[in-house]
């Protein structure tokens, strides 16, 4: 890391280009919009985390005597809605993707700056409807909005919550459109497709899913709202509807949505592995095309969520087989990252710790996904805590580990300042330990038969539940620490310099923080992605 006590922040940077509230709320600078998203999704992460605290506290005793049944239903529902729709899906694309994509391809901004700003406002409007649903008594349908409970039986605030998520979907669609056009049309001279960073390949594949998948869930939620408001017979069997149709429509989007959350995170890990191993990514082309493979295959496996929902045996066999196939491109990434690390000059900086943690946790999540793709095992563990643990190993252990790793890696570029490295490493270890202590016991609970979404359980399950709740408290500390030291670094952190990690890539060829238009002159790319010199000389860790 560069010593920078004599350096100063560049006088002309995007943070200093106007200080008033109008200059931020009316900005068309992709970097400032990324920070607006960062503030918003951090707020919703805290809300979702608060609901998770309520869940784990209630599960500390077998009787579930802290809250009532109805309140518990609302706790896990609102935790899921906040985390999935307002944090996990936009976390990486809307923040790091928004900030870095133009910088990484040598562009001055995204293709449609006004649409980019509009996407943030749409996101905020959708979130306000959903927050109103929470204030107006909460939501108790589960984050999946399964019918006919959501269309008829539930007395909670389904309408505003569904409307909020529907509105929020347009934010994803516009962001995906903006990214695709920018990648196609605004690359710097010499930035060919196979010189693109793998972070860009991952966001390109993610944008395809956003554009093709999000309208499906949006229309599905419109039908739920319409049936609930006007009693149309779409999903409710009491009026001629079919609840299994809802599941087909919902999971046709929601399984690819898993990759909206994970694919950008995989892009981050590729950048971290290359930077801190000082090597080109092993099998760059395979890793790039594996992102597209995941995006395509992700649309073909939704039926594995419905093995016990009345699906035909033959359909279940086909979905089971394709679900095994979708693991192949994910495995390509993990094996290639491992091969890149082999005999690499590994630097154990904080971002690399998160990358290693991601690989371990995502591998566990991916392998247990194969268990759930096996029909016999899935029938046994469906709707148990085994599914909860698998989902969190992929989503939380994967997405959030990579998100935190990316924030630590690019924080010097975003803010122009460094954070306290020792404290950051401690936080990374706390997150890893706390996460495993929280969710690994849930695999055992699920296999032993504890159903998900129950807040009362047999006393023999208490030890594992207390262990899980204790792990959650450790995990919360690990998540809170970065918030404090990032805020501290904004004023007191050492000046970072333009390239504190000695990394390659266009984003490191401009100042930290970058100027409003990113580059003083349009860069010309004459090197391949991850072209690190061998051997490395003069790099100070």
Image: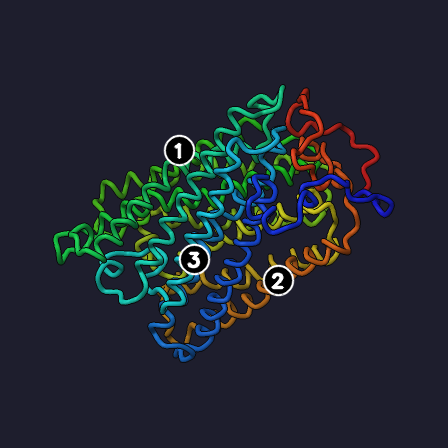
Of residues 6 and 360, the one drawn nearer to the viewer in this rendering: 6
Where is residue 45 shown, x and y percent of the image? Answer: 52, 58
Work out whether mark 1 precedes mark 3 in sequence or the reverse, and give the earlier one: 3
| Residue 409 visible to an observer of this rendering | no
Q: Residue at 31% x, 41% y: name it.
A: 319
Q: Using the rendered view, name the quadrant where residue 445 is placed.
A: bottom left
Task: Report helix, strand or loop for mark 2.
Answer: helix
| Residue 458 visible to an observer of this rendering | yes
Numbered tag placed on residue 296 in the rendering? 1
Q: Is residue 533 above or below residue 484?
A: above
Where is residue 112 shown, x and y percent of the image? Answer: 50, 33
Q: Is residue 110 above or below residue 22?
A: above
Q: Nearer the viewer, mark 1 or mark 2?
A: 2
Where is residue 470 shown, x and y percent of the image? Answer: 55, 70
Q: Residue at 72% x, 47% y: name it.
A: 349
Of residues 135 and 65, the one drawn nearer to the viewer in this rendering: 135
For the N terminus, the image quarter is top right
Residue ID for mark 2: 480
Work out whether mark 1 precedes mark 2 in sequence or the reverse, and give the earlier one: 1
Q: Is residue 148 above or below residue 329?
A: below
Where is residue 171 shown, x and y percent of the image? Answer: 44, 44
How far apart marks 1 and 3 lie (CA) works out to: 33 Å
Q: Is residue 188 rendered to the left or right of residue 66?
A: right
How far apart marks 2 and 3 lie (CA) works out to: 24 Å
Of residues 438 and 314, the one drawn nearer to the viewer in this rendering: 438
Residue ID for mark 3: 128
Numbered tag placed on residue 155 in the rendering? none
Task: Report helix, strand or loop for mark 1.
Answer: helix
Q: Nearer the viewer, mark 1 or mark 3?
A: 3
| Number of marks in picture | 3
Task: Report helix, strand or loop for mark 3.
Answer: helix
Q: Is residue 129 rendered to the left or right of residue 249?
A: right
């Amino acid at each position: 890391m560069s010593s920078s006590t004599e350096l100063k922040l560049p006088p002309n940077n995007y943070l200093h280009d106007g200080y008033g509230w109008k200059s931020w709320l009316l900005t068309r600078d992709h970097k400032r919009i990324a920070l607006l998203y960062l503030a918003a999704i951090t707020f919703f992460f805290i809300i979702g985390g608060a609901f998770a605290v309520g869940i784990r506290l209630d599960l500390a005793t077998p009787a579930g005597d802290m809250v009532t049944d109805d309140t518990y239903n609302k706790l896990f529902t609102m935790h899921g809605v906040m985390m999935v729709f307002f944090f996990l899906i936009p976390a990486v694309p809307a923040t790091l993707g928004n900030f870095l994509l133009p910088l990484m391809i040598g562009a001055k901004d995204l293709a449609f700056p006004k649409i980019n700003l509009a996407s943030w406002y749409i996101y905020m409007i959708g979130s306000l409807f959903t927050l109103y649903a929470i204030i107006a008594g909460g939501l108790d349908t589960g984050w999946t909005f399964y019918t006919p409970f959501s269309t008829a039986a539930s007395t909670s605030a389904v309408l505003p919550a569904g409307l909020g998520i529907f509105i929020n979907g347009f934010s994803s669609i516009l962001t995906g459109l903006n990214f695709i056009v920018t990648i196609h049309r605004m690359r710097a001279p010499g930035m060919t497709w196979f010189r693109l960073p793998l972070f860009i390949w991952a966001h390109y594949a993610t944008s395809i899913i956003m554009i093709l998948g999000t309208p499906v869930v949006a229309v599905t939620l419109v039908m739920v709202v319409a049936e609930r408001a006007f009693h149309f017979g779409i999903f409710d069997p009491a009026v001629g509807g079919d609840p299994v149709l809802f599941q087909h429509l919902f999971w046709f989007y929601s399984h690819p949505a898993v990759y909206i959350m994970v694919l950008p995170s995989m892009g981050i890990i590729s950048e971290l592995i290359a930077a801190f191993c000082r090597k080109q990514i092993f099998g760059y082309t395979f890793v790039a095309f594996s992102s597209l493979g995941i995006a395509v295959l992700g649309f073909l496996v939704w039926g594995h969520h419905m093995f016990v929902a009345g699906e035909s045996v033959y359909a279940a066999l086909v979905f089971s087989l394709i679900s095994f196939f979708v693991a192949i491109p994910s495995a390509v990434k993990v094996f290639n990252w491992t091969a890149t690390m082999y005999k690499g000059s590994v630097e154990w900086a904080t971002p690399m710790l998160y990358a290693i943690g991601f690989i371990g946790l995502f591998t566990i999540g991916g392998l247990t996904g194969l268990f759930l793709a096996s029909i016999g095992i899935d029938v046994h563990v469906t709707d148990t805590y085994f599914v909860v643990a698998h989902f969190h190993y992929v989503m939380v252990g994967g997405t959030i580990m990579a998100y935190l790793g990316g924030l630590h890696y690019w924080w010097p570029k975003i803010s122009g300042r460094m954070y306290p490295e020792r404290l950051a490493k401690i936080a990374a270890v706390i997150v890893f330990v706390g996460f495993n202590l929280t969710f690994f016991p849930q695999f055992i609970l699920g296999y032993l038969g504890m159903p998900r979404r129950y807040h009362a359980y047999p006393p023999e399950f208490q030890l594992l539940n207390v262990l899980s709740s204790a792990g959650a408290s450790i995990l919360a500390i690990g998540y809170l620490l970065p918030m404090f030291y990032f805020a501290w670094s904004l004023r007191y952190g050492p000046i970072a310099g333009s390239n504190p990690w000695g990394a390659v890539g266009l984003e490191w060829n401009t100042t930290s923080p970058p100027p409003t238009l990113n580059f003083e002159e349009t860069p010309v790319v004459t090197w391949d992605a991850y072209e690190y010199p061998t051997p490395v000389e003069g790099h100070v860790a």
